[in-house]
Image (cartoon, rainbow, N blue to C red):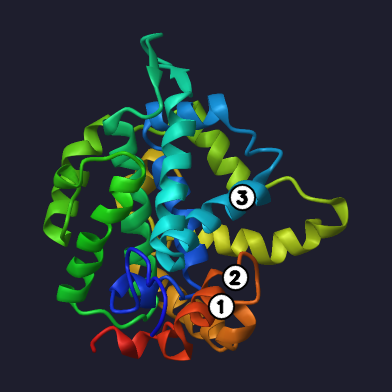
Amino acid sequence: MDGDAGLFTPDSVTWQMHGDPMMWVAGIRALYLQALHPRAVRGVMANSDFRRDAWGRLMRTADFVGTTTYGTSEAAERAGARIRKIHSMLGATDPDTGERYGVDEPELLLWVHCAEIDSYLHVVRRSGFPLTDAQADRYLAEHRVSARLVGLDPAVVPGDRGEMAAYFEKTRPRLVAGADAHVVDDFLLRPPTHPLLIPAREVLWRRVARLAYASLPPYAHELYGRPAPEPAVVTRRLRATGTLLRCVPARLRWQLPPKHILRAMARLGPDTRPAPYKVGR
């Protein structure tokens, strides 16, 4: 292997897991979960044009995750610096108190980070990607690196499943499905699209969004006020979806932009190809 292997390297759980196609479903779950923090979602609503640029926002997030996972160390640090600079210039008004605050408050950054990383791990693992409990803990510990990139102190970021569960238990009383959360919910079910693509949205996208919603923890379903299937049913659907998507050849899936995995393999050699069986090496 030649060249800069990046911040995670091919030896990490992150390198292998982030190549899985269920990451897209996990990303939608993260949006549902993140929207339950009133100050966090208000920051998005006040500073984002996501309702008119849904695909662009999704691709920018995918580009950041891909860059930090598979890019060089320099590229990852640049991406982090860019995010920190943008966040430092943005603010919002608390919907309850009227207080003006910055979107780079550590509490908000930590919530967004934990909702995202927990969703990645939960959905990909529940859909059949083989990870032991120790490897799941290792994944969470690895993402103290990505937390640092967005401006968090790694020492305060949950580094294993126990710490992550304790964090959500502590944060749970602050969560609520307010008006902003319901806007996000409606948007995820019916994102704006070209009229000719509406049938595809109804057949494909809505199924994916509903699956992502169903995979949320029970308290999130209670807050949104919309029920979900029984957990065993959700797990079966996640596994079926994961099995189907993994039947699509990886080389074909990885041709979709932004192609970070293909570029990493070209830089470091074909042996660095992400694959589930490599996690236990």
Q: Residue at x 19, y 53 (%)?
A: 164
Please tell me the numbered disc located at residue 189. 3
Specify whether 90 is left or right of 105: right
The answer to which quarter of the image holds residue 187 is: top right
Question: What x and y, as percent, mark residue 173?
Answer: 23, 33
> What whole-number distance in Å separates the C-alpha atoms at marks 3 and 2?
27 Å
Sort mark 2 into few (<14), some (14-19) or many (20+) by Cα contacts within 10 Å. some
The answer to the question of whether label 1 and label 2 lie on touching residues, with beta carbons closer than 8 A, is yes
Question: What x and y, as percent, mark residue 12?
Answer: 28, 74
> What whole-number distance in Å separates the C-alpha atoms at marks 1 and 3?
31 Å
Please tell me the numbered disc located at residue 259. 2
- The kind of secondary structure element at disc 1 is helix
Q: Nearer the viewer, residue 274 or 96?
A: 274
Q: Is residue 232 visible?
A: no
Sort mark 3 into few (<14), some (14-19) or many (20+) by Cα contacts within 10 Å. some
Q: Which of the two marks, 3 or 2, is nearer to us in this view? A: 2
Give the position of the N terminus as an image quadrant. bottom left
Q: Residue at x 24, y 53 (%)?
A: 144
- Residue 164's place in the image compared with 10, above or below, is above
Question: What x and y, as percent, mark residue 153?
Answer: 21, 41
Question: What amino acid type should be assigned to the residue bearing mark 2?
Answer: Lys
Q: Nearer the viewer, residue 222 or 72?
A: 72
Q: Which of the two marks, 1 or 3, is nearer to us in this view? A: 1
Question: What x and y, as percent, mark residue 21?
Answer: 51, 74
Q: Nearer the viewer, residue 32 or 22?
A: 22
- The kind of secondary structure element at disc 3 is helix
Question: What amino acid type should be assigned to the residue bearing mark 3?
Answer: Leu
